[in-house]
Image (cartoon, helix red, strand yellow):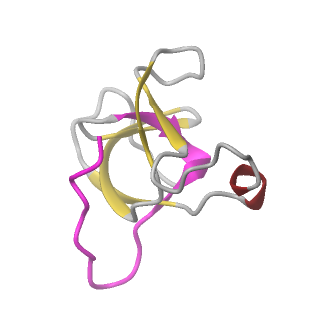
Amino acid sequence: MWCDQTAASNDRFCVSIVEASDEVKADPEFSPSSWLILREGPNGNTKPVGKTGTVGKVMADAVDGEWTHLANRGWVRTKIVQPCGGGEQAPVDNSIG
């Protein structure tokens, strides 16, 4: 895993939401602005709490196994995000939710 954050951590870190896969985009119900389900807890059986699309850089505050918590939003699969890199940090989009 690329990050040693845990569900108990309060440290925030930058992640980028990756582009939807071709398989996801092929779904007739695909919407670029709402293809990613945000969940209440770190597993696929928890209640959906919202949706988002590919929005670029956002703040996360925890990783629990294969799940990453987007700060003040919900949990997504860690494979859907990647750590922000490079020297200069791009602005973080705080409007998703």
Q: Can residue 51 be seen in this view?
A: yes
Q: Position of residue 74 (x, y in %)?
A: 37, 32
Magenta residues, start to end: 74-97
Residue drawn at 23 percent across, 36 percent down: 72
Residue drawn at 63 percent across, 48 percent down: 30
Q: Which of the two residues, 81 or 93, is positioned nearer the viewer here?
A: 93
Q: Can residue 1 be seen in this view?
A: no
Q: Which of the two residues, 72 or 82, is positioned nearer the viewer here?
A: 72
Q: In this view, does 45 lie to the left or right of 70?
A: right
Which quadrant of the view contains residue 39? Answer: top left
Is residue 83 covered in magenta?
yes
Residue drawn at 50 percent across, 15 percent down: 46
| Image height of 8 relative to 76, above or below | above
| Image height of 59 relative to 44, above or below | below
Which quadrant of the view contains residue 70? Answer: top left
Quadrant holding the C terminus: top left
Q: Which of the two residues, 76 or 85, is positioned nearer the viewer here?
A: 76
Residue drawn at 60 percent across, 22 percent down: 44
Q: Is residue 33 left or right of residue 31?
A: left
